[in-house]
Image (cartoon, grey):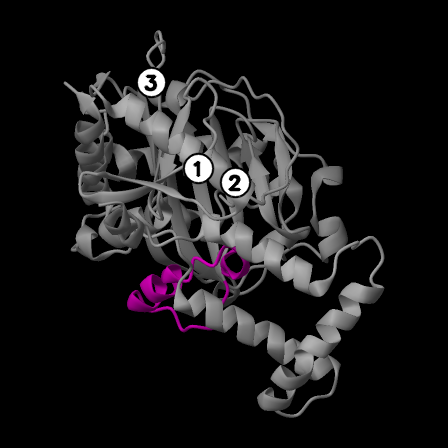
Amino acid sequence: MSKNEQVQKNQDGDNLFASKKETDFGVNANPADEQGAPLCNTAPPKYHQTRIIRSGVDSLYLSFRGEVRSGLLSELQEKKEIAKGGRRSGKAVAALRLANIPFKVHAKGQGMHPFVVSNAHFRLRVAGENAGKVPPLYVEISSELLSCCGYESSLQAAREVADSLLTDADNGSISRIDLCVDFTSRIDWQAIDAKRWRCRSNRRAFYLESEQLLGNVFGQSGEVSARLYNKTKEIERSEKVFFKELWQQNGWDGESSVWRLEFQLRREALKACQSIDPDFIIELFNSLWCYYTTQWLSLCDINPSDSNRSRWPLATEWQTLSKAKFTRHPVEDIHRLNFECIPSDESIFVGTTGYLTSFMVKYEIESMAEALAVYLEHARSYFKSAENKHISFDAYVEKKVAEKRLKFVKLGNLLESEK
């Protein structure tokens, strides 16, 4: 789920298996009121065609027990001070190597964990000396690592990092896991009649990305929640372009919109099915997915002659999604991935070219050479005249460069320079 997601926060006390409640979402909750006509239930089968592209784990949050290694806390504190100085000067960055993987040390901690270190694929929170009952280490694994290298390889890498930080580290337990299925479909999922949804939670919100409606969230802020959204549009902003290659390997035509159905399961929900053990849960992926897509959230076909919604049959397209399988398959070597905190060439050049071509259309410019020649002139004019900017174009550029020197950094080079 993107960091830019803007949805209303709601408390949801529904229990995973104990709850027998199914919610009938009211007509007022249906985005189809503004998106267009609802789906016709009598449309021919071809219209309903839904094809699964891939399935997998999108997010994995682990907690580890053990003792932080002697001397590591003082090193983290020292590098944290360097990072704080960097935030003021816009120059200094602190780096650390764990399990032979480079990490960036952040200037701020999070909650009960005074130290945060990260790279492109891991985010670690490390507790201090007076942590009490708080787990000394939390590890968040990126969707790219999980998608490209697989669940088991990512779990093993996380355990190696934990062993480098902690003495007598355990095997970890799951704090949160997101199971997802990517698929193509002819259906406008935003235009579905809200009465067709059955859910064990009465919480529903819109999935927004930069104020653009992408989908829906069911059970927001609960121990279980589901998201159904247009993944193709979402990655235009998240720049997770690696998904396109994975989709193409599974037959995606490169043009059709890819949707994602995703279930987020937190610790209490996982406890209910005794699956906080990261080694055991992999055997439950298929059964968990089947349960959540048939018993927790489902899309049904309306039966006008039956007022009992629980007897309405599953929609054909939802039956396809509920039968998705999570299988093990060969994956990329984890050591070949880039852990540096820098954007990819693809995101830089594709993104920049997109904005420049928009600039060319707006100002009726015929060639890229001409666009590059006049861009600075237009940019300086904009910053000079724009209201509430209070900053020149050159000052703005200097400010953004300083920020991104801290955000984007070649950690390996930085560690070599420290020797």
Q: Residues within 10 Å of mark 1 (few under 14, many from 20)?
A: many
Tag 1 residue: 83
Observer-nearest of 134 and 166 = 166
Image coords of residue 80 (percent x, y) = 40, 31
Image depth: mark 1 or mark 3 in front: 1
Q: Amino acid type of disc 3?
A: Lys
Image depth: mark 3 or mark 2 in front: 2
Tag 2 residue: 87
Q: Residues within 10 Å of mark 3 (few under 14, many from 20)?
A: some
- Is residue 20 in sight in this rendering? yes
Is 390 positioned to the left or the right of 418 in the image?
A: right
Judge whether residue 234 is colored magenta. yes
Q: Which residue is at 42% across, 72% downward?
A: 254
In the image, the segment drawn in magenta is 232-257
Q: State the CA–CA distance, disc 1 to disc 3.
A: 38 Å
Q: Quadrant of residue 392?
A: bottom right
Q: Amino acid type of disc 2?
A: Arg
Observer-nearest of 322 and 63 = 63
Q: Secondary structure at mark 3?
A: helix
Q: Amino acid type of disc 1?
A: Ala
- Is residue 305 in sight in this rendering? no
Q: Which disc, if any, is residue 271?
A: 3
The mark that comes first in sequence, 1 or 3, is 1
Q: Secondary structure at mark 1?
A: helix
